[in-house]
Amino acid sequence: MVSLRLLAAATVLSACRVTAPAASISPIPQPGATAGTVWQLTYHEALPGQRDRLEQFLERNWFIINARAERTGYLVGNHLLRGSDADTTWDPVEISVYDDSVQHSRINSIFRIVIRPQHTMVKVDGFEFRELGRFVREETLRRRAKSL
C-alpha cells in the first residue's frame, strides 16, 4: 500500500513540475484513457550497506534515461525519494510523472525502442544494479475522476 508520505510527496512534486514542451506527444483520446496526472512509483531495496551506491546507480543510469525522455516530452517529471531509516521494506523509491494515461501507456515501447538504446550503463564503483539492490514493486496512481 502506498504510504501517505509518498502520496503527499508525489502530489507536491507534480505540482512543481514544468509542463512538457509543445513538441511532445499530443495525447489522442482513447477508450479507457484517464485525464490528469499519472504517477508511477517504483520501489527498490538496497542490499546492506549499498543504499548510497544504489541511489548513485539510479541517478547515473535511469535518471539519465528519464531526463532524455523528459526533454523529448515523453515524461514530465522524475524524482528519487529516500525512505526513513526505520522502514527497511523499500528504499529508495522512484516517482515518474506523466501527463495522462495515454502518455503513461506509451512509455514502455518508447523507452525500449527510442530511449534506452541511446544509453550505455554506468557502473558505480564497479557495481551493477543487481549487486546493489533489487526491484521491490511498482504502483501506478491516477487522480480519481470527479463524481458529480
Image (spheres, rainbow, N blue to C red):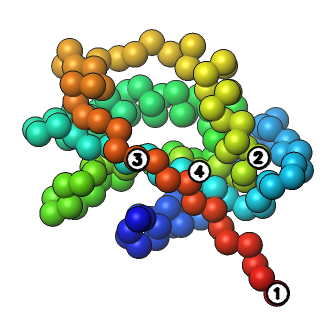
Look at label 2 and name its amino acid: Val
**Residue 102 — which label?**
2
The x and y percentages for residue 40 are: 54, 50
* Distance from the alpha carbon under mark 4 to that under mark 3: 17 Å
**Residue 148 — which label?**
1
Task: Look at mark 4 in the image and give the residue it sits on.
Answer: 97
Task: Look at mark 3 in the image and give the residue it sits on.
Answer: 137
* Distance from the alpha carbon under mark 2 to that under mark 4: 12 Å
Count residues near mark 2 (Cα–Cα under 10 Å), then give few for <14, some for 14-19, many for 20+: many
Left or right? Give the position of 32 relative to 129: right
Q: Nearer the viewer, residue 130 or 82?
A: 130
Count residues near mark 1 (Cα–Cα under 10 Å), then give few for <14, some for 14-19, many for 20+: few
Q: Which quadrant of the figure has residue 66?
A: top right
Judge depth for marks 2 and 4 and give the one in front. Answer: 2
Count residues near mark 4 (Cα–Cα under 10 Å), then give few for <14, some for 14-19, many for 20+: many
Point out the tag, 4 or 3, that comes first from the N-terminus.
Answer: 4
